[in-house]
Amino acid sequence: MAKILICDDEAGIRAVIKRYAVFEGHETFEAENGFEAVRACKERTFDIIIMDVMMPEMDGFSAVKEIRKSSSIPVIMLSARGEEYDKVIGFEVGVDDYVVKPFSSKEIMLRINAILRRVENKDNTDGHKLFSVDGFTADMTAHKVIIDGQPIELAPKLYDLLFFLIRNKNIAVSREKILTEVWGYDYFGDDRTLDTHMKLLRRALGEYSVLIKTLRGLGYRFEYEKKY
């Protein structure tokens, strides 16, 4: 059973998500705006947050940014708008997934359960895993990335994407495989989600973005054998 915080200024949407979440055995909590969500996260621990974007007093982006100062809890963002610009903002502040309204309750629960399984599997991984080449170091156990001696901050999903590519280094992985493994389910949303994340990841890696090779018509490969 997971503790789910549902933050949306529309009571009807909160009620629908709550009904399906409770049916699957989860415990739910509600917030009407970003301020309430931030306060709730300071008062108790949740396993995942469902966060609307457009809300009075404090919007979803601002709320997630504030929550990320002290917690890496997974967040699924809800929005009535599907523009890439909005998604980029969400992913940059640390959103794990993005769902455009209107959505089906089945879709929401698939995404919730997929993220919860991914987090559980990551928590059960034993051993310290470290990858390093030249001035680039990825500590997959400590969830740290260091470039030329300086730590860089990535959104949670960018860590997941980078570490997945590293674990499959020198192997060609398809877009479908990446979406399934990193997002945790047979992805049926906007395929541009991966493109957006890859752009953000490459931007963050700077000169070491050349470690990630694009395979046209297939996917990507993390390649580290050559000297850069």
Image: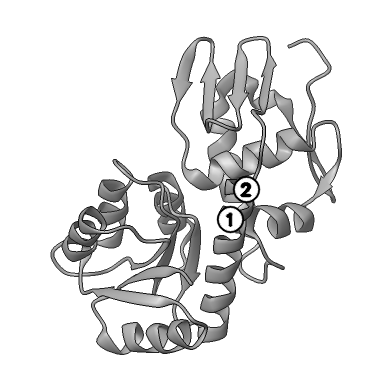
Q: Position of residue 222 (x, y in %)?
A: 76, 32
Determine whether, in the image, residue 202 is placed left or right of residue 86. right
Determine whether, in the image, residue 181 is placed left or right of residue 189. right
Quarter of the image where the C terminus is located: top right
Q: Position of residue 103 (x, y in %)?
A: 49, 82
| Residue lying at the far left of the rendered structure | 57
Snapshot colouring: one colour
Q: Residue at x 22, y 57 (%)?
A: 38
Asked if the residues shown at circle 1 and circle 2 are in contact, with their CB atoms under 8 angstroms apart, the answer is yes
Q: Hey, what amino acid is under mark 2?
A: Asn
Around disc 2, counting alpha carbons within 10 Å, would you say few (fewer than 14), some (14 to 19), or many (20 or more)?
Answer: few
Q: Position of residue 137 (x, y in %)?
A: 61, 19
Q: Nearer the viewer, residue 214 or 2?
A: 2
| Residue 104 visible within the image | no
| Residue 74 visible within the image | yes
Around disc 1, counting alpha carbons within 10 Å, would you say few (fewer than 14), some (14 to 19), or many (20 or more)?
Answer: few
Query: What number is the disc on residue 120?
Result: 1
Q: Element at badge 1?
A: helix
Query: What number is the disc on residue 124?
Result: 2
Q: Nearer the viewer, residue 63 or 109?
A: 109
Q: Residue at x 72, y 38 (%)?
A: 165
Where 55 sits versus 10, above or below?
A: above
Could you give the CA–CA distance between mark 1 and mark 2, rounded to whole angstroms? 6 Å
- Displayed quadrant of residue 32: bottom left
Q: Position of residue 25 (x, y in %)?
A: 49, 81
Q: Residue at x 84, y 50 (%)?
A: 218
Q: Hey, what amino acid is under mark 1?
A: Glu
Q: Element at badge 2?
A: loop
Q: Residue at x 86, y 37 (%)?
A: 171
Determine whether, in the image, residue 169 is placed left or right of residue 129. right
Where 125 sits versus 147, above or below?
A: below
